[in-house]
Image: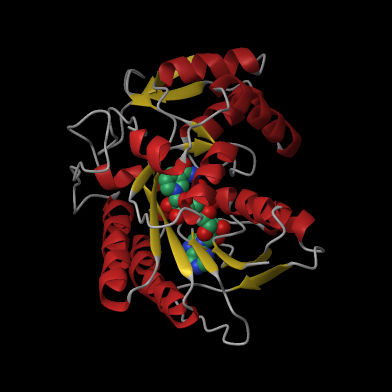
Amino acid sequence: MKTVLVTGGAGFIGSHLCKFLLEKNEKVICVDNLFTGRKENIQELMNIPNFRFIEHDIIDPLYLDDIKIDQIYNLACPASPVHYQFNPIRTVKANTLGVINILGLAKRHRARILQASTSEVYGDPIEHPQKESYRGSVNCIGKRSCYDEGKRVAETLFFDYHREHNVDIRIARIFNTFGPNMTKNDGRVISNFIVQALNNEDITVYGTGKQTRSFCYVDDTMRGLYNLMNTENFTGPVNIGNPRESCVLEIAELIVKLSNSNSKIKFDPLPPDDPKQRNPDISLAREKLNWEPKIKLEDGLKDTIEYFRKII
Ligand SMILES: NC(=O)c1ccc[n+]([C@@H]2O[C@H](COP(=O)([O-])OP(=O)(O)OC[C@H]3O[C@@H](n4cnc5c(N)ncnc54)[C@H](O)[C@@H]3O)[C@@H](O)[C@H]2O)c1
């Protein structure tokens, strides 16, 4: 039985991952400062003997010297623009000081550590679809930079700890993920549209809605992270995302239909640095991790709509 630490484990992806690891019979320690994560997301896990929750901010050092940790998934970082721009300096701190603290923990425990990086490291990409070899087109002084540049330097730190201290690292570049346990006020495309549709409010599409996104259902993302963690001799970075590309307007229309809503679509100005196209090339994940998404967009949306119907 392995002991696995999940930072950000009370968040959207983290809570699914904790549950999945417990089902695999692993011991799970969930570390979270509950900034965007919620205890409700992990409520059903709290009574499981193999599960432990520690409220802690990774910006502060974490020791846990009384146990032996085998694997660490570092997910602790607010992920939606509303949340990471709320306190941009803290976002940078989570991705620098926080990442150094967690890498230090991995080094002391000789644990394998996986970083939840992001497609945002590609910025507003010139290359399309994005391969891992693409170096990105990122604005370093914009409002999104605390996250985009934060995640870039986090990758740098991972590779420096790997080269200098032989830390066993894995880097996943996660593309847009959706599913139950997203928060309803996070301003992300899918949660926004579903909440608006269920409330029969206008659906806000930014720009013309022709910008594309590719959405991966959370179960698929989680399996990708798990496969990466448990694949030998491969650090990544590797893209984890769904190559099915849809324009934002098409998603809005699909959500209105699937939720039987009366909402109308309204168009607002595009926010600065909003990427026009986002689409992963997942050949590397297919080859090295034997992974590709399995859940259809429509099926994932139905589950997510049901989740939001319950919590609204
Ligand atoms: N959801 C996506 O589409 C997506 C895409 C790319 C990358 N990611 C990455 O995956 C990870 C999880 O994303 P998510 O969508 O579940 O977001 P989320 O906001 O739901 O989860 C992040 C979790 O980290 C916690 N956290 C934030 N700062 C912390 C800190 N300093 N110390 C301890 N805990 C802290 C939050 O409370 C929350 O529980 C993030 O690192 C994010 O950057 C997510």
At 64% from the left edge and 73% from the top edge, which residue is drawn?
A: 54
> Which residue is the extreme one toward the front?
233
Q: Tell me the quadrant of the picture where the C terminus can be found.
A: top right
The image position of residue 104, as x and y in percent, is 41, 79
Q: Quadrant of residue 209?
A: top left
Q: Nearer the viewer, residue 75 or 162?
A: 162
Q: How many marks?
A: 0
Residue 30 spot, x, y in % from top left: 62, 66
Colour scheme of the picture: secondary structure
Q: Is residue 303 above or below residue 48?
A: above
Query: Can the viewer see residue 159 in this picture?
Result: yes
Against 303, residue 36 (above or below) is: below
User: Do we see residue 79 in this rendering?
Assistant: no
Instruction: List the single residue furthest toward the bottom.
Output: 66
Choose between 299 and 88: the one closer to the eye.
299
Pick the residue in front: 309 or 56. Answer: 56
Residue 307 drawn above or below residue 96: above
**Residue found 71% across the figure and 29% down from its top:** 306
Residue at point 44%, 37% (across, down): 176
Q: Where is residue 160 shown, x and y percent of the image?
A: 26, 70
Q: Residue at x 23, y 37 (%)?
A: 124
| Residue 141 placement, left or right of 259 | left
The N terminus - image quarter: bottom right
- Foreground residue, 49 or 236? 236
Would you identify the image quadrant in which residue 52 lies?
A: bottom right
Q: Position of residue 112 (x, y in %)?
A: 46, 67
